[in-house]
Amino acid sequence: MNLNNISKKAKIGNNVFIGNYTVIEDDVVIGDNVYIGHGVMIYNGARIGEEVKIYHASTIGSIPNSVDYKGENTTVEIGAGTLIKEHTVISKGTKHSYKTIIGENCFIMDNVHIGHDVIIGNNVILTVGCSISGHVEIGNFANIGGMTGIHQFCRIGKYCMVPALTGIGKDIPPFSLAARNPVRYISPNLIGLKRRGFSKEEIEEIKAVYNIIYYSGLNFSDAVKKVKEDFEVKGNVKDIVDFIESSKRGLIPSLKEKGEDF
């Protein structure tokens, strides 16, 4: 008895498990060695890499929650090795970028919502119940705590750590630990950076740069100028400078700016 509705036009790789009551539409590409659980909905435009696991009742490539979406042919790309837990919804892109991108080896826990035109890097962790609005960008190795909400067009830099129940309305620069509501810059993500193999010298340099950005008394523009004067702008320093200079929503403030203690 066939309990699925799988289009013969879909391109499905080798060694793919597909659970009961799953629907796969025509314009879908699925790589080798993929696991798709029971009751999964995979819409037109889904591009699923090798070794991906999608657990039951998840939706991939859903119609965007955007009044501007008029049925354009857009995609959602899921990178190889990514794990998507139960009841997660990932929307396809709109005409803004025509795609939503999830990187490789991400861990997306249950009940996560990822909106249209989102770009998520590699090795990102999205914990239970995260709500990622449209056009958000999240860098490699970022770790976002449960029930966190991210406003549209916000960016979270690589190697950032954000704890549970955080509301994010501005950009969080790379290598940062951010917390509180409203969200504040706390410090570099020291534990996360150590775990990812950053040297003591690299961490100290990142810390020194952020002391200028957040604690020198300068506005962000002047602080970046001082960083360029005091440091060689390459590697991690360049990542920080480039991120700040390209910010459109502005950066989160620090605790000290508000007179708070952690």
Image (cartoon, rainbow, N blue to C red):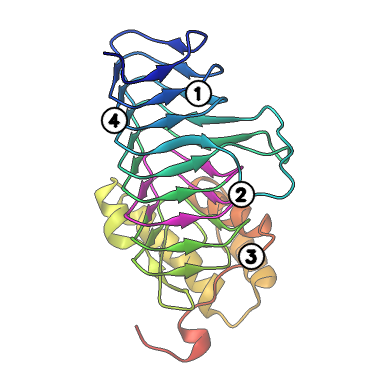
Q: Which residues are magenta?
A: 116-143
Give the number of the disc on residue 224.
3
Which residue in the structure is indicated by mark 2? 65
Labels 2 and 1: the sequence-earlier one: 1
Q: Quadrant of the N terminus?
A: top left
Q: Which of the two marks, 2 or 3, is nearer to us in this view?
A: 2
Rounded to the nearest angstrom, the CA distance separating label 2 from label 1 is 20 Å
Q: Which of the two marks, 3 or 1, is nearer to us in this view?
A: 1
Is 71 rendered above or below residue 227? above
Of residue 213 and residue 189, the one placed in the foreground of this image is 189
Rounded to the nearest angstrom, the CA distance separating label 4 from label 2 is 24 Å
Rounded to the nearest angstrom, the CA distance separating label 2 from label 3 is 37 Å
Give the number of the disc on residue 47.
1
Q: Quadrant of the C terminus?
A: bottom left
The type of residue carrying mark 4 is: His
Of residue 128 and residue 80, the one placed in the foreground of this image is 128
Q: Residues within 10 Å of mark 1 (few under 14, many from 20)?
A: many
